[in-house]
Image (tube, helix red, strand yellow):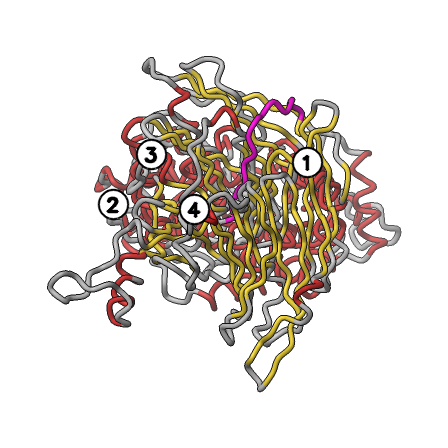
Amino acid sequence: MLDLKCLFDSQSEVAPWLLEEKRTPLSDHGEATSPSRTDLQIVNVEKDGSVLFTWKLLYNFDGEVSVMSCSVNMERTLLAVSILQFVGRGLPSEMFRPVARCLALLIEIYPVNHTKVLKAIDPNVKVQFLYQDSNPKLLSESHLLIISEERCIEHVCIKVVIEEGYRVMIKNPDHLIKEIVAEDFLWAQWDAETQKLYYIVKKKSNAVLMYIQFYPERSNKVLISFSLGFLSTVTKLRLVNFGYNHFQEEQESNESLNLQVFTNHAGALSVCYSHPVQDEEEFVYSLILLHDGCRKTFRVSLEKSKCACESELAFINIGYYIAVYVPGYFLHLINVQHPHLVCHSLFLSGEDAKVKPWNHQRCTLSLSDLLLDCDLGKIYKAELNPLSLMLFLRDSKLTCHQLAAMHCAVLHLQDNSEVESQIIHWLCGLSASSCSNLVQEFVLGTLYRKAISETNAIAKLLPYTSLLNWKEEIPGVTCTTEEILQFAGEKKEMMSNAESLKNLESLHNALHANNSLIRIKAKLFSEMKLDARAKRNVVENAKMILSKMNTRSPGEHMIPFSQEEDCQQMVLIGLMSELLKDYLQKCDHSLKEKIIDKIVNNYVVNLLECIWIIVDAIWRNYGLNAHSLCLSNREKVNSAEFVVFHMMTCVLQAVEGLSLPLPPGYHTLHILLGARCLPLHTLLHYIDLGMLHPTEQFVTKLLEEFDNSEINERFKFSIMARIPEIVGQKICCLWDHPVSSSRIARNYVETLLKKLPTQQKSTCFSRREQTPSQTEFLPLAYLARILTELEDQASNPLEKQGNVDVKFVEEAALKQTLILLGLENK
């Protein structure tokens, strides 16, 4: 699942250069020999990616020395190094002279001149320059951390003077400014990327994590103090990310604290540590997610009885995930960006858990987001392997594994079109009942990834998953979660996270409430009828979004979506954009209105395009062509059409389950497939359930392609009886049938009634209460009312001839109607 990408290889990148510079000793035959791995050793990696390595000696000393730590300043004018002296190799008079075992030295590089002893003690010493400014110009001072195993960290300010434009000399080397920034600590870690120093001190038997931020203006500040919640029982100091000491003694893992702190560009701050071994058949480790306010403790039971204390957990930072790895045991990819659901993390064992070319456990060290193979002299960066991830997705039988792989592939592999195509192809092979959640994960994950790629400011405001909870555990690992409330320091970020979670929860509730969706739709259309201006604004907004979608991907799809007017989907598209704008404005007041408009419009466009891509891929996968769909030859349906129909039904259910709109034309294409694949009674059942929608385009195609045979007449009549009134009014003229004639007559009479003067119309309808037994046939009722009105008029030429027999006229009209409809004998 993980690949180790080699970023630096000392043997291939350094050794040839050394040979070319003739800096290697000559062999017995007078030829230059390549330096061995023990001679060429990596000691540190700086923030800018500079790799520091040693080969034999860096400088000429009185005797051979061993480099334990090394760092160079950003301008590469000063070198700090700590060396291990071999006492007793000098003259006999020097053998009994007290000499410090370890020296910390400061050396001028341009020119090679002064060497200043910064510290001389017996315990080991580490050195690390601060990289506080990205400007490569020469600065007047440099800053250095000196970390000793006496449990003291000093901050040294080194002022320099520049002579002749390039000669850098230490100013007043005997009076360097020093200050102690930490002491009596149990563990310390340097984060080169963020220039932060983390360390742990013991307070009242509790381990307390603190970190210091170093700023360019030569200042530092303790930003946080947090109780880790466990007793500090370690006996040996551990220093993390201060380079690698090739001469350090082996130490047992249970004597020092195996803990690392990781950050990523999205603001996650995670504290990872392993628990002391109590059961040789179980690993226990915890992650404190300070950005999320929780602690997660995992227990992994080993399948075979092995001694767990022989291997130590390795924590690897790979961005959105933290990998917990024990060679030969397991690989656990923990999602720290979205840690709420266990099914968003991956747990692998056996062959799936192997990380190649991971060498011996004690020879591979995790340096923040890098891995150092001390034996081979190589530096790696851990990356997710898309091929392995897709194989795991394809072969997994458990839903939690499928969701974890889907979430990982969609959100964290960036814009990988090949992976996207493989996921859709895999979805096509699933049953419609089992892929609804996965389709929802794919849609929301894709939208989330594209949205935060534009601006990370809304990462905590948009939904990234379709699941509200997941109570099942991943096989092989148990997880317990507890909230953490006690911390001091900067709380602004954490409070912001908590508020964002509340906002996100409210948005999720809106997205998942199907009953609420029905009420919203009903309310929407009732309001739109009353407020034509609001409806016009919403529809215009939807038209603008659709035009942008067509501009971004013209001619790329084979499915002809967005080429018809779908009033319902147009209103829903416009409504979604309006609601999303209001939501973002309410939750984040720092975003300007134009930026929010752009984010929302792109979000809705990406939604419609995502659905379009899914359906397009399904049709391509099964070799269908939308232009070849014909209702008249329903007997020539192949199996691929059945599969595509059920897949489109699954996509429809997934999208509507999220209360999201569909591209205009989706319902037409869907019901066309349904009319070809389903028997009439099943088709009508799908329509009655609301799973199929008889659109105007579909009914028009139905009337044009079906002849007037008895079977087709029944088919058309069943569909026409279920279409909305507004659709029926538009297309009734296309069907030469008494039902259509009746509808046309009703519409015509209704139009006449609306055109009557107000006084006459009110008088006419006032008669309705007086004649409750009137027939409900509208033209006939209208005729009767008009005749009654004429009868009541004062002076009338018909008065001398007697009143008009309204009943007779009504019966005559009804008889004539029956004759015209051919129903007089029935």
Label 1 vs label 2, nearer the camera: 1
Q: Which type of secondary structure does the marked residue at label 4 adopt? A: loop
Q: Position of residue 513 (x, y in %)?
A: 63, 33
Could you tell which of marks 1 and 4 lies nearer the N-terminus? Answer: 4
Residue designated by label 3: 678
What number is the disc on residue 698? none
Label 1 vs label 4, nearer the camera: 4
Q: Which type of secondary structure does the marked residue at label 1 adopt? A: loop
Region in magenta? 229-242
Is residue 96 inside the magenta stretch? no
| Of residues 222 and 408, the one drawn nearer to the viewer in this rendering | 222
Please report the residue visible at 40 percent of the width from the left and 45 percent of the height from the top.
246
Q: Quadrant of the N terminus?
A: top left
Q: Which type of secondary structure does the marked residue at label 3 adopt? A: loop
Could you tell which of marks 3 and 4 lies nearer the N-terminus? Answer: 4
Identity of the amino acid at label 2? Asn
Give the CA separation, mark 1 to mark 3.
77 Å
Please report the residue visible at 60 percent of the width from the left and 83 percent of the height from the top.
163
Give the CA separation, mark 1 to mark 2.
85 Å
> Are dots 1 and 3 in contact, CB under 8 Å?
no
Residue designated by label 1: 184
The residue sitting at the left extreme is 29
How many numbered markers are drawn?
4
Could you tell which of marks 4 and 2 lies nearer the N-terminus? Answer: 4
Give the CA separation, mark 1 to mark 4.
28 Å
**Position of 757 compared to 422: left or right?**
right
| Of residues 204 and 614, the one drawn nearer to the viewer in this rendering | 204
